[in-house]
Image (cartoon, helix red, strand yellow):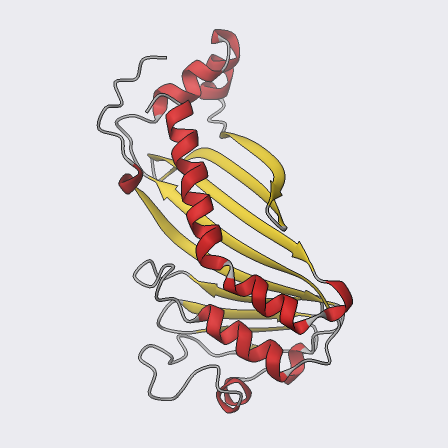
Amino acid sequence: MNHNLGILKIKDMQLVNFALVILAENHNPSSFSPDLLLKMGLFRTDDPGFELSSSPVITPPMAQMNFKNGISINCDMNRLVFEDANPAHLPKFSPIPDMATKYVKQVPYVPYKAIGINFTNVLHRPDVLPPYRIEIFSNDLSTFLIEKKSDTGVRMRFQEDTFMLSVDIQYGELKAVPYWRFNFNFHKDIKDSDILEIINGIREYKNLEKASESYSKSFLKMMGM
């Protein structure tokens, strides 16, 4: 392929979402509240941005809290998600690794099963993206996909150190602007609800983010960078 991509760089890609997922058998969503998390020390009243952006939703099957700084906390019976969608935080200054660590330390009796560390990178480059979708497939299939306005992508799954990594690379359009979206999900099963193993897994987030960036670079190179 010849796409004239000499100016395409990894800096053109932006990390837009970082999430920590704690899987368990019996989270208790109805017990969640901003006051409880404040008492647990997950944040302080003087922390900038930790004002609620909307009323929290607290029900027996699920709980949801969204903050003005881009942090959100979602919980159901099997899944607790700390999510940071503020690119200014990511990943170095995000508070969610510390928040998740404090939570599992203070709630050790929950039967934890696994953790997930997720990153989403987005590359907006309308000047170079369209040829990829056209040339990856045969002419007849490419024409069909374009006429149907179909998104295309790649999915992979493999081992990354002690984590199972699932990668979903998708091409699409948002408001007529083409983009590549790179979703990285690092999954680690936890044996015997080991709190220390969870904490050590959370601490790996910086190394895993670097790994996700490296995979993104490799993909761009493969595509003709």
One can see residue 58 in this view: no
State the residue at coordinates (57%, 50%): 186
Q: Which corner quadrant holds the C terminus?
A: top left
| 108 relative position to 160: left or right | right
Q: Position of residue 190 (x, y in %)?
A: 71, 62
Measuring 59% from the left and 57% from the top, which residue is drawn there?
Answer: 116
Residue 23 position (above or below residue 195): above
Residue at figure coordinates x 37%, y 36% from the top left: 179
Above or below, 184 against 198 in this view is: above
Against 202, is 124 above or below? above
Q: Is residue 30 visible?
A: yes
Q: Which residue does the image show at 54% across and 74% down from the upper left?
A: 101
- What percent of the width, then of the height, locates residue 182? 46, 41
User: 147 or 137: nearer the eye?
Assistant: 137
User: On the rendered image, what quadrant is the N terminus found in?
Assistant: top left
Q: Is residue 2 left or right of residue 31?
A: left
Instruction: Please provide percent x and percent y for residue 37.
Output: 52, 84
Counting from the top left corner in percent of width and height, residue 198 is at 62, 67
Of 120 and 76, which appears nearest the observer? 120
